[in-house]
Image (cartoon, rainbow, N blue to C red):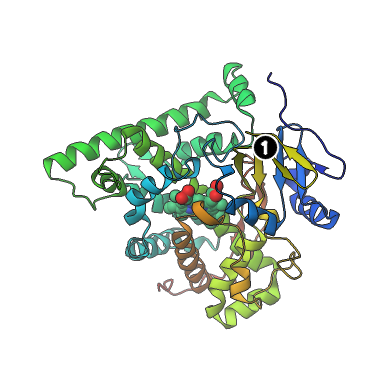
Amino acid sequence: MSEPKTCPFDGVLEVDFNSEPFLTQFKDVYTQIHASGCPYAHSTAGDHYAVASHPEIMSILKQYDIWKSKFGPGLAFQPEGSGVLVSVDPPDHTFEVKIVASSFSMAYFESLIPTMQQFVDETIDSFYKDGQVDLHSALSVSLPLFVIFTMLGIPLHDEQGDKTEWIRDGIFTTVGAMLKPGEQAMQEMMSGDIDPKHLQAVMRTQQMFVDHLADCKNKLESGEYQEATNIVCRFLTTPGPDGTFLSDEKILGFCAFLLTAGSATTTIMLSNIIYRLLTEPEEFAKLQADPALIPMAIEETLRLDAPVQGLFRTNDEDVDLGPIHVAKDTKVMLLWAAGNLDPTVFDDPLSFSLDRDMSKVRRHLAFGYGTHFCRGAPLARLEGDIFLRTVLKRLPNLRLAGEITAEKRMPVLQGIGELPVAWDVASRKPRRI
Ligand code: HEM
């Protein structure tokens, strides 16, 4: 084991971000940190520090020359140059952004609206008559996966069957490891602690991307595919500012990153929105009376129930954070979800209210801030809008129909695992939008 880089400090809360008490009571922990007057936490288990205050997180994100992404957004030190976007600093980041820009434009996202609407409608058609469903697996999981696969140009269902289960197993395995130190992740792999089914799912996912990349190259060459056929074709045909193209490794990295960044996060957001509304009857009534509040319901849920708890930066030089001396190359977790509950920025931060000022709510950090601000945020919001609007229109008298369960396989993401809901089934054919 290497020497720890961090240590506990007087007045700095000690937190194990992988432990059961944190996973079940993380909002209490954030509230405690905010109330303590010291916005930092330390994890002996993970050998890292964490920052909870909104202004302090923003300040760190503005100091680009000190706080780097090059060792990756997770706790393990990723080899430099091995990742994409979130694991890259300018100027390499600027190069990658230029190439992926057209795949993250509003015009491209909006072109997906009819396909997304059709998917949501057909999915609801498939379970509508039952009068009840686990909305999480039926729609919150399937919609974001469908969208990412559509962008990539890979069918989610083909003659070999539905990929959802093993794709999800692969996501749980990779995202589940994000709060594990590199050494621990390696030990688990060597000692066989990781379920072989999950490892196999990761490998199967990688192979799917390798095959897809080869297929896109062949079809571009033969003229069967064009630049805009899917985002892999766009990556292959768009040069960076210096005229060179992304390497195959980078393109494969983009595919893997998009799958996790774009689906697991959005899935959590979708279920959280429904859960919030069904457990806050007064706010739900306001929304039903005024659907113009849908964007506010999405934003307020992102603020109060941020899907990503936090991600890491690494300092390029020794720095002091309040009482903490942070040695060069230390992992520090920026707690988006805690910044969103900072009482110095959001009044009554633990309450869910659709009466807030939108410009203030949108100061939330659920999508990060600055250079690495989420490029899929407009798409996630569109998915939320289509999902919520359609569910509310087509599933009248929507209500909870049992206990919800928490998803604990990915500590860096906090969300729902099962969301049983029921509605009143009309005798006539269900109405489409
Ligand atoms: C509710 C859903 C989502 C949440 C909460 C979320 C959250 C985040 C956060 C916190 C970051 C910042 C990472 C950092 O600063 O280290 C980020 C970056 C990113 N996200 Fe999202 N995301 C969501 C949906 C999506 C979707 C749907 C896509 C793509 C289809 C996407 C693509 C990206 C990309 C490409 C980046 C990297 C940006 C860069 O480094 O330039 N995200 N996301």
Residue 165 picture location, percent across and down: 47, 39
State whether residue 403 appears in this view: no
Quarter of the image where the C terminus is located = bottom left
Question: Crowdedness of circle 1 by 10 Å Cα count: few (<14), some, many (20+)?
Answer: few
* Residue located 62% across and 69% down the image: 361
Residue occupying the far left of the picture:
222
Quarter of the image where the N terminus is located = top right
Please name whichever residue, 404 or 105, is drawn nearer the observer in this view of the structure.
105
Residue occupying the far top of the picture:
191
* Residue located 31% across and 39% down the image: 246
- The answer to whether 317 appears left or right of 129 in the picture is right
- Mark 1 belongs to which amino acid? Asp
Q: Which residue is mark 1?
A: 318
Q: Secondary structure at mark 1?
A: loop
Residue 106 picture location, percent across and down: 37, 64
Residue 283 picture location, percent across and down: 67, 75
* Residue located 60% across and 42% down the image: 313
Q: Relative to 128, is 234 above or below?
A: above
Residue 72 picture location, percent across and down: 54, 38
State whether residue 281 appears in this view: yes
- The answer to whether 314 appears left or right of 390 in the picture is right
Q: Relative to 349, is 368 above or below?
A: above
Residue occupying the far right of the picture:
10
- The answer to whether 212 appears left or right of 312 in the picture is left
The tally of labels here is 1
Please name whichever residue, 86 or 216, is drawn nearer the observer in this view of the structure.
86
Q: Relative to 61, is 294 above or below?
A: below
